[in-house]
Amino acid sequence: MILRHHLVPPLVATFLLLLAVAAPAAADPALRQRATAILALDHHAFLFVKTTAEPPFDWSTDGCTSTPASWALTFDGPCQQHDFGYRNLGRGLRLRPTNAARAWVDRRFLAELRRVCAERFAARALVRCRVRARAMHAAVRLFNPPWS
């Protein structure tokens, strides 16, 4: 198939537009730094910042995917924060789509799960909560694909 001369400029313009839409966030170190700072907050502060829905970040969440309802309720804040990390550093904005960044996001998730346990439970309930937290962390490590 031969491209007609009058079709080439629109095709090139479309290609350049697609590149411009897909690339700017990944190229913006300030945006990457802001996303990392938001994710470094404890989940309480994260949930407060989330109320501003600061653009251009993806604040959507599916909660604690594939977990028992009681776990999802207990760990909702850390799950929302974890989703933020995956949607902005990994998928979506792709501000830092490396396996090292994914491991850091997952470690932050475990730290916040443990924070919930320490804040809400004592004695045997604390031990049970920490086992559940570890299981959730293991699941995200095992069942989510690599970023790079």
Image (cartoon, grey):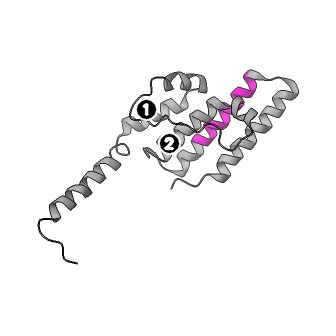
- Answer with the quarter of the image where residue 109 lies: top right
Distance between mark 1 and mark 2 Cα atoms: 14 Å
Q: Which of the two residues, 27 or 8, is positioned nearer the viewer here?
A: 8
Q: Is residue 148 above or below residue 1?
A: above
Q: Which residue is mark 1?
A: 34
**Label for residue 87?**
2
**Left or right placement of residue 1 versus residue 47 in this view:** left
Q: Position of residue 78 (x, y in %)?
A: 63, 32
Nearer the camera: disc 1 or disc 2: 2
Is residue 116 within the magenta segment?
yes
The quadrant of the picture occupied by the N terminus is bottom left
Most frequent secondary structure within the magenta stretch: helix
Q: Which residue: 65% across, 49% down?
A: 141
Taking the view exactly as shown, the residue that stands out farthest to the left is 6
State the residue in front, 99 or 50.
50
Q: Along the horizontal axis of the image, is 7 left or right of 68? A: left
Q: What is the secondary structure assignment of the residue under circle 2?
A: helix
Above or below, comparing residue 91 to residue 121 in the picture = below
Nearest the eye: 124 or 18: 18
Secondary structure of the residue carrying tag 1 is helix
Badge 1: how crowded within 10 Å, few (<14), some, or many (20+)?
few
Position of residue 98 measured from the top left corner of the image (x, y, whole percent): 50, 50
Q: Amino acid at mark 2?
A: Arg
Name the residue nearer the viewer: 60 or 29.
60
The region drawn magenta spans 105-119
Instruction: Please say whether residue 60 is one of the residues in the magenta stretch.
Output: no
Residue at x 50% of width, y 26% of height: 50
Q: Position of residue 132 (x, y in %)?
A: 77, 38
Mark 1 belongs to which amino acid?
Arg
- Neighbour tally class for label 2: few under 14, some 14-19, many 20 plus, Cα within 10 Å: some
Quarter of the view holding residue 74: top right
